[in-house]
Image (cartoon, helix red, strand yellow):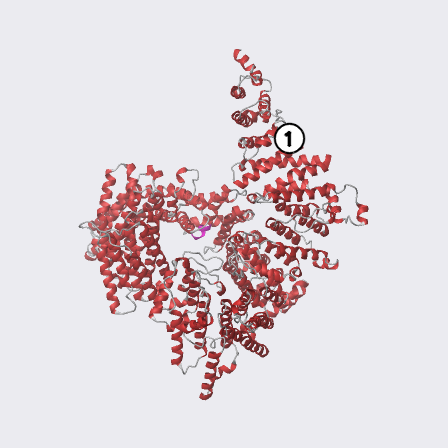
Amino acid sequence: MAGHIMLAGIHRSLKDADTPWNDKLKLARFAWCSSQCFLPNKQQVLLDWVCNALANQTKFDIEDETVCTLWQYLHDILNSKQMKKTIESSASMSIRDALYPVLCDALRVDSEYVAMATACCHIILQSSSLGRSLTGKHDVMIDLLCALLHLVTKCLETSNSLQDTAVPCLKMLLKKFSLSHRQRQLQAHRKAFTAAYERLLIPALALYTCEEVGDKSTLKGQIEDLILMGIFNKDMSEVYRLYLTINRDSLEGRDKLKEGQFTDIDNFIGFLQKEAQCCKEKDSRINPVLAGLPVLYRTFITAYKPTADAKFAMLKKLCGIMGISPAAKDSGIASSPPPSCDWEQALPALELILKDVYINDIYVVSVDNSEGQPKFQWFLQLLQLLLTSADKPSASLFNCLHTFLDLNHMLIEEELTQIWNVSLMTHPSSSHRADNFEESRTAFLGSLMQTYVKLRQFDKLLECLLASFNQEEPSTDNTGDNLVYFNPGFVHRFSQCIQELPPGLTLDLWKLFKDDLVNSYISRISDATNLEPPKKKKRRSAASIGKNIETGLEQAAVTFHLFLTSARVIDLSATKVMMDRTESLMAETQEEVLQALHTLCQNATEEVNERILFATLLLTYTIGEIQLILLQHTKYGSKLSKYGSDNAEEENQATQSAVDILENAPCIGDFLNLKSGEEVMDIIGGYVKVLGSDHHRLRHLVHLLRTQQLRAVLLHSSSNDGTKDDGVMKAYSEDVLGSIDVEVDSDVLGATWDGQVASITHENYPIAFLHVLTQTFSIWLPHITTQHSNQVARLLVQSFSSDTPQQDGNLTMSSIARAFLSSDVCMESKELQTELLSAAFRCISNSAGSFSPKKSSKGQRSSSGIIMKYGKLLSMLTEVTDIQDTNWEVLEAVGSEFSTLLKDNTSAQGSSKKVKGAVKNILNILNVLDQLPLTHMLPTNQDRCMLGLVVIDAMVTGWLATGDIACQPQLIEALCFCRNLEMNILKAMKSTGILKCFEVSSMLAYIINKHMHAWECVQETNQADSLSGRFLVLDDVTQMLMRQWMQKAAHRASQEENILMDVIKLIEDKISALIAKLKSSRPSARLNHLHGAIPLLTTVATIIQRTASPQTQDSKNRTYNEAVKKLCSWLQELLTSVDVDSAEEVDVLLVGCLAKSAVAVVMCQKAGREDGVQTVSDQDASVVAMEEDDSSPALATKKSKKKRTVESVEETDDASLWDEVLEPILHLALTHIGRMKGVEPSDPKAKRKEGQQVGQAAILSACLDYVRTVCDFVGDHRGKIDGGIMGKMWTCVSMAMSVEEDGQCKAEILRAASSILTCMDVDLFSKTLEETLQILSLTELSPVSVASLQSCVLSWQVLPDCQLSEEKHKFLQENIPKAITSLHCLLVESVRDWSMTGVLALNILTTINSVMTSSKKLLEPKQALQTLQACLAVQFTSVPDDYFPAVFSTMYLLLKSLLEAFPQAVVHCMAAYMASLQHMLRGVMRRCHQGSEGAGRIGDQELFSCAENMERLLTQLSAHKKEVGKFVIVLVAEYINELQKGTLLPFVKRALVVGVYNLVDVCDEKDVSLLQATLPHNVKEIYTEFYSDYKKYHKYKGRV
C-alpha cells in the first residue's frame, strides 16, 4: 500500500515548483512505464504535463538541456507501445493547443530540437486520434504548414537527412489542410483567400521551385492543389473573369463594376509585386515569386479554363509583376512605376509562361489579325524589350525566342538583325554551358533557318545576317576581340538548310554575298586607302580603317565560305541557263572580290590588316574549291576539255590554255603562282610587315591552297609534260610535309578544334594541320619520301598521347590519328605501316633509355641496365624496313639477344614515377598498334611487331614482379593489352618462322616465374583485395596466350612437346613444394596456400587442357604423355585438399581457379580412358590375329577378366574423382554462383570487394563451365552418382537466371541450364517443368515474383534446343500449349510497366519465338497462330527507347518465323496477321518521325535496322501474291496515313519505301483506285506524290 501511496503523489510532485526538473522527468518516465501507477487517465495527464511544460518553458525558467530532455520524453511517449494500444482501443487522446506554437518554432533547421520536433509532428499527424486536435483550428494549421514548408525547402537545398521525416509530415498535413480550407471557404472565402496568398503562397512557391524537389512529383501535385484551392478556387471564378475582361476606364465597365469587387485581387497582385521586389533587394539566389509565376499561370488556366482573352490579360498581369512590361492601367497599382526587371531570374519564368501560351493557343494569328493585331503588337513590344534589356544571352532567352518563332515568325522578322547579333556574336563560356546555352541557341537558330527555307525567304534571313556584320559598333568582349562564333551545331544546321535550297535561289544568294562584300567592305576599304593625304601627313594605311569594317569583312568571308562549301554546286550546272549564270557569277566574284582584295593587299604601303589578309586567302581557297568541283564534275569551262581531241596541235593548244588558265586564275595561280612554300611566306611577309605572333590561320590557309594547287595539277595538267608536273608536285610535297613538327607541346595535345579556319589558334593549329594532312594524304602518298613518311608516322604516334575526349563534335589530335589509322589509306599503305611500327618502337626505346644504369654491388647486375637493353632491342627492330634477307638476320639477332636476357634473373626496377611515365607511354603505343591492321600486314612487319610486343611484355612483366604497388594497376592493364595484341597476331600468322627467332619455352617460363612472383608480392601487401580481381583477368589472358603459343608450336615438328616439357620441368618443383606445404599445414591454412598458387594452378590447367584436347592427342610421345598424366595426378591431389566444411571462407578468385583446374582433370581422365579403351581393343585385335585358330575357353576367360579389370579400375578412379575432387568443388562453385549473382543479398559475406568485381565475369564463366563439365560427367555415370546433385545445380543456375538481365554472362548461364536440363532424368525433368508452369500462372507482379518468372521464362527459352530423350521430348510437347497460354497472359501484364518488367516482357517474346522456330515442331498450326496475340499485346507507344529496338526485332523474327513455318495457317488467319503487321508499321514510323523523342534518343543505326526488318517482312509478304493480294492495300493506306502525321527520317524512309513499293506491286488497278477513293482529302496529295514516285523509280525499273 505504501508503494501505491507514493505513486499517488506523482501528480502533486510534477506540479510542485520545488521539485527539480530532472526528478520530475525521472518520475514521469517511471509513471508512464510502471504498471503500479493508478492515476486516472494517466496517459492524457502525462501528455498534458509535458505539453504544458514545453509551452511555458520561459515562464518556468527551464534550462535548454531540460527542454531537450522534455522533447525527447514527448517523442518517447508518443512513439511508445502504450500510446499505440491506447489509440487502437479508440480511447480519446488529444494534444494541447499550447504545444503547436512551440512546435512551429522548433521546426527550423537551426533549431536545437528540430529532429525530435519533426518526429513528434510526424507521429501526431499520422495518428487519427492525436491529429484530430488540429481539425477546426485553421490558423494553427496554417502556422504549422508554413513551418513545414520552410523546413522541407531548407532540408532539400542542404541535403539534410531530416527530409526523410519532414517530407511525409508535409504531405500528411497538406491532405488535412485541404479539408479544413474548404470548410473555411464556405464560412468566409475572402479571409481564406487572403490567408492563402499572404501566409502560404510564398513558402509553397519556394518549395515548388526548389531544384531538389524535381523527382517528388506527389509533393508538387499537392502544392498545385493547394494553390488551386487557395488562390483559384471556384468562388473566385467570376471575379477573376470580370477582373481580366472589364475595362474599368470605359463607361460600360464602370457600370458593371461594384464597389470593392476587385479589392482582393488587386491586393493579391500588389502583394506579389511587393514580394518580388523584396526578394530582389535581398539578392536571393532564387526569387520564389518570379520562379513561381509559371505555376500560378498554369494553375489559373487549369482551374478556370478561361477564354483566350482572359488568358492573355493574365499574361500581361504576370509580366507586369516581373517588371518586363508596365502593369495595366486597371490593375489598381498603375500609379506606381513598374520595378526594374531582374532578367537573370525573370527569363526562366517567362520561358515557361510563353510555352504555356503556345500550348494553350492563346495567340491565334488569324483571329488576332481580324481584331487588329492587338496581341501581335504586345508580343512585338515584349520581344523588343527582351532584345534590348537582357543583360547577356542565356538559354532561357533563346528558348523565349524559339517560342516567339513558333507563335508567329512575323514577330521576329523585324528584329532579325538584332537577333543575329545576339545569337552569333557570343562565344560560349563556362557559365553558358551550365544552362544548356549551346543546345538552346543551336535549336533556335536551326528552327529559324528551317522556317525561312520553307517560306522560300532565305535571302531575307541572309540579308539580315550580313547586315549584322556591317555595324559601326560590333559586339566585343572585354579584350576587344570580336565574339562572332559559328559553333558546330550551327554549322551543321546552316549546311543542311543551304543544301535544301533550289539552285536558282542558291545563285541569288551567291550574288547577294558578292554584292555585300563589294559594296559594304571592299569599296569602303578602297576609298579609305585611296584618299589624298593632307599636307605633312602620312598616307592612311588599311590598318587605320575602322575596326568594324575589318571584322565585318572577316565575318562575311567566313559566312560566304560556309555557304559555298555547303551548296549543291553540281546542281548549279544542271541546265545551260544555270551554267551561264554560274560562269558569270564566278567571273564577277574573281574580278570584283578576289582581284580587288589581292590588289588591296599588294598596294598596302605599310602593313595589311591580318583580318583582311585572312579574308583574302579564305575566299581564294573557297572559290578555288568551287572551281575545281565544277571543272571535275560538270561542263563548266568546257573549252578546257578540248585536249581530248584527235588533232595533236589542237590538243597541245588546248592543254596550254588549260595550264595558263589554272596558273593565271586568281583562285589558284595568280596569287601564289605555283611558287615554293618559302616564296609564299615571303609574299605574305611582303603584304604584312607587323602582324604579331599569330600567323597560324594564315599558315593553315597556305597549306590548304598548296593542297588545292596540287589537286588542280593532278586533275587538269598536260599528260605530255610529266616532268614539269612531277617537279611541281615534289615541290608542293616538300613545302607542306617539310613543315611537320614532330615535337608537339603538351598543351596542344590537350586542345580541341571545332573545324573552322577562323578559330585556329596557337594551341589548336597542329590539330588543324594534322586534319588537313590526313584528309589529303592520298594525294601526297605517291610523292612522299621516306623521311616525310617517318615524320608523319612520328606525329601520328605522338598524337595518341592526348587524353582529351572528343566533345561536341570538336576534333583532337588523338581522334584524328585514330580515324586516320583505321582508314583505307593506312590499311593499304605498307610503307606507312612499316614507319608506324618503327616510330612506335622508337618511342618506347627512348622511354627505356631514360632509365640510367644504377651502381650495383659486386656480383650483381644493374636492374636499370636491363631496361636499357630491352630498349636497345626495340631500337634494333626499327632498322627493319623492307623484305630482305638482312632484315631476317636482324630479327634473329634480336631474338637471340632477347632469349639471353630472359635467362637473366635480374628484375627490371625503376622509380615509381619513371615506371608510371613509361607505362603510360607503352599504353599509348599499344593503342597505336591496336589501330593497325595487324592481321593483314606484311609478314616481315608481323614478325617484327610480334617480337616487339614480346620484348615489351617481358619488360612490363619484369616491372610487375618488383612488387611496386603504386604501379600495379597500370602495369596489369598494359600487360593485358599487350598479350591480347600478341594473340591476335599469332592467330593471323601463317608462317611459324617467328619460332626460330627466340626460345618460346624460355619466354613462357619467364612469364610464369615473374607472374607467380608478382602474385606473391601482391598477397603480402595491404592492397591484395583491390588488385586480386585485376590479376584474375591477367591470369585468363595469360592462359589464352599460352594456348595460342602451344597451338602455333604444334605446326612445327616436336616444337610443342619441347615447349611443354620445358614448362613442366619448370613447375614440377613448385608443385612438389606446394603439395608438401599442404600436407604439413592445418586444414584451415590450406586454402590460403592454394590462393597464393592461383597462377601455378592456372598454368597446370592450361597445359592439361591443351594436351587433353582431341586435336592434339595423337601427336604425343610416351614420355610426354606420362609427364602430363603425372601433372594431372598432382593437380588432382592439390584439389583433394579443399575442405568442403570451410566452403564459406573460400575466396571467389580461388573458386574460379579450382573450377578451371577441375575441368582440366576431367578432360585428362576422359582422354586417358578413351586411350585405354583404344589400347585394349588394339591388343585384343592383335591376339585374335595371332590365335584366330585357337578358340579355347581359356582365351575367352582371359579376355573377359581383362575387360572386367579395366572396368573396375575405371569405376574406382571415377568414384574417387567424384568424391574427392568434383563434388567438393561443385559445392564451392554453386555457392559462389549464387553469391556473385546476388541471390543472397542479405548475407554480409556476399559483398564483393572492388578489386574482385573486375574479374566477376571470368569467375562466373569458369564456374559455369565447370557445371557443364559436371553435367557431362554425371550423364556418363548415371545411376552411380546421387541424382539429387542435378536438382541442386538446377536450383542455383535458375536463381542466377532470375537476376541476370543481359551481358556476356547470360549466354553462359543459359548454356549451363541447357546442359542440366539435358542430363536430368525423366522424373526430375517432369517435376521441374510442372514447377515452372505453376510459377508462370502468377498474375500479380512484384519485384520478387518477377525474379522467379524471369528464371522460368528463360528455362522455357532454352528447352526447345536441348538434346532431350524421346520420353522427355514427349512430355515437353504435351505441356507446350499450357506454357504458351501462360506466356501470353504474362506478357499482357508485363507490358504495363516497362520500368519493372521490361526485361521480362522481352524475354517472353524471345521465348515464344524460340518455341516457334524450333526444328522439333513443338506447336500445332492453331497453337502457333495464338502468338499473334503477343504482337498485338505490345503497345509501341509505351515501350521505352532503350527497349524499342530489341522488342521490334524480336517481334519481326516472330512474324517472320510464323509466315515461314506455317504459311497455310497464316493464310486462313490473314486478317489477324495483317493487324499485327499494321501495328508494327505504325510503331516504327511514329518512332522514326523527325523531331520525335525516339528519333533523338535511339541511335540512327538501331532505327535503320528496325526499318530494314520491316522492309524485309513486307517484301517477304509480297511473295505470297495470290494469298495476300486483297489485304495488302490496308498496309499501304497505313503507310500513307503515317506519312501525313510527320516527316520520316530520310534513311528510314529509304528503307521502308522499298517494302511498301513491293506491296503495291501485288495490288491490281481496282485496289489502287479503291485506295485513292477512300483516303481522306488531306492525305490524297501525299498519296499522289507517293504513287508518282512508285511509277517513276520502281514500277518500270524491274526487280532482280
Q: Is residue 1441 above or below residue 775?
A: above
Q: Nearer the viewer, residue 1382 or 1443?
A: 1443
Magenta-span inclusion, residue 1358: yes
Q: Is residue 1527 visible?
A: no
Residue 605: give x, y in percent of width and height.
Answer: 49, 73
Q: Is residue 543 above or below residue 1093?
A: below
Report the span colored magenta: 1357-1361
* Main SS category, magenta section: helix
Residue 1296 quadrant? top left
Residue 678: give x, y in percent of width and height.
Answer: 40, 72
Q: Name the residue furthest front.
A: 536
- Which residue is drawn at the image coordinates 61% and 46% (left, top)? 291
Which secondary structure lies at badge 1? Answer: helix
Magenta-span inclusion, residue 1165: no
Residue 149: give x, y in percent of width and height.
Answer: 60, 38
Characterize the local packing of mark 1: few (<14), some (14-19) or many (20 or more) Cα atoms within 10 angstroms: many
- Please indicate whether residue 1193 sits to the left or right of residue 1464 in the image: left
Q: Is residue 47 visible?
A: yes
Residue indicated by mark 1: 134
Q: Amino acid at mark 1?
A: Leu
Q: Nearer the viewer, residue 1384 or 446?
A: 446
